[in-house]
């Protein structure tokens, strides 16, 4: 992973397309403050941004390249859950800004990639000092988590129904 020191203002427009920043995207000052807590990192093809089971404290906003999201089977084999190009305006690892748990999946660069990175402590400090900006971002993360939880519940009910039907 290569950390790059550069002016990040050129990425302001990209941030406006990231759903986490929907509520503040028209506030130039707020968007600049978000960029101020970001760093820029390069990843080579095949390099992991996130490893399943490890503790993490970073959110990644993919600017260039693409990634695969991988999960381990019970047998320990990796399978690709999905492939995501930067053009989809993706961000990965938002849970790490909220909790202190292990990563739920592996994220691997499938092409040379570039990402903005927000560290948890920088995000928490930012939210404490600028709650009018941090709160809408935190709400967006909570909404995403809620949507995923509802989807997981639906999937579990589908599996349960299929199992009951199979047993009968």
Image (cartoon, rainbow, N blue to C red):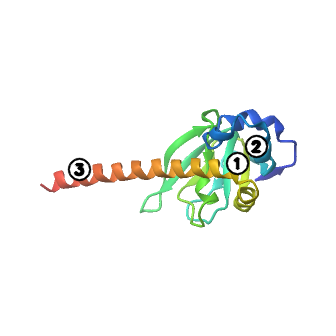
Secondary structure under the numbered disc 2 in the rendered image: helix
Label 2: few (<14), some (14–19) or many (≥20) C-alpha neighbours in 10 Å: some
Secondary structure under the numbered disc 3 in the rendered image: helix
The residue that disc 3 covers is 162
Q: Is residue 98 visible?
A: yes
Label 3: few (<14), some (14–19) or many (≥20) C-alpha neighbours in 10 Å: few
In this rendered view, identify the residue nearer to me: 89 or 113.
89
Q: Quadrant of residue 115?
A: top right
Return the disc, 1 or 3, that comes first in the chain's sequence: 1
Q: Can you say which quadrant of the picture contains the C terminus?
A: bottom left
The residue that disc 2 covers is 30
- Real-space Cα separation, disc 1 to disc 3, in angstroms: 44 Å
Furthest-left residue in this view:
168
Q: Is residue 41 visible?
A: no
Return the disc, 2 or 1, that comes first in the chain's sequence: 2
- Real-space Cα separation, disc 3 to disc 2, in angstroms: 48 Å
Residues at badges 2 and 1 in contact (C-beta under 8 Å)?
yes
- Real-space Cα separation, disc 2 to disc 1, in angstroms: 6 Å
Mark sitting on residue 133: 1
Q: Position of residue 41 (x, y in %)?
A: 77, 49
Secondary structure under the numbered disc 1 in the rendered image: helix
Residue drawn where x is 64% and y is 52% of the image: 135
Label 1: few (<14), some (14–19) or many (≥20) C-alpha neighbours in 10 Å: many
Q: Quadrant of residue 105?
A: bottom right
Residues at badges 1 and 3 in contact (C-beta under 8 Å)?
no
Q: Position of residue 131 (x, y in %)?
A: 70, 54
Residue drawn where x is 29% and y is 52% of the image: 157
Residue drawn where x is 70% and y is 48% of the image: 133
Q: Is residue 123 above or below residue 16?
A: below
């Amino acid at each position: 992973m290569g950390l790059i020191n550069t002016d990040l203002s050129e990425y302001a427009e990209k941030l406006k397309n990231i759903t986490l920043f929907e509520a503040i995207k028209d506030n130039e000052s707020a968007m600049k403050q978000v960029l101020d807590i970001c760093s820029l990192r390069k990843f080579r093809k095949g390099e992991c941004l996130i490893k399943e089971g490890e503790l993490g404290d970073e959110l990644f906003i993919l600017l260039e390249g693409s990634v695969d999201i991988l999960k381990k089977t019970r047998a320990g084999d990796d399978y690709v859950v999905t492939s995501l190009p930067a053009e989809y305006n993706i961000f990965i690892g938002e849970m790490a800004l909220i909790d202190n748990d292990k990563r739920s999946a592996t994220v691997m660069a499938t092409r040379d990639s570039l990402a903005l990175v927000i560290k948890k402590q920088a995000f928490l400090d930012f939210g404490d000092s600028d709650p009018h900006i941090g709160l809408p971002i935190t709400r967006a993360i909570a909404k995403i988590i809620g949507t995923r939880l509802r989807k997981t519940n639906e999937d579990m009910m589908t599996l349960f129904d299929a199992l009951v039907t199979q047993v009968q």
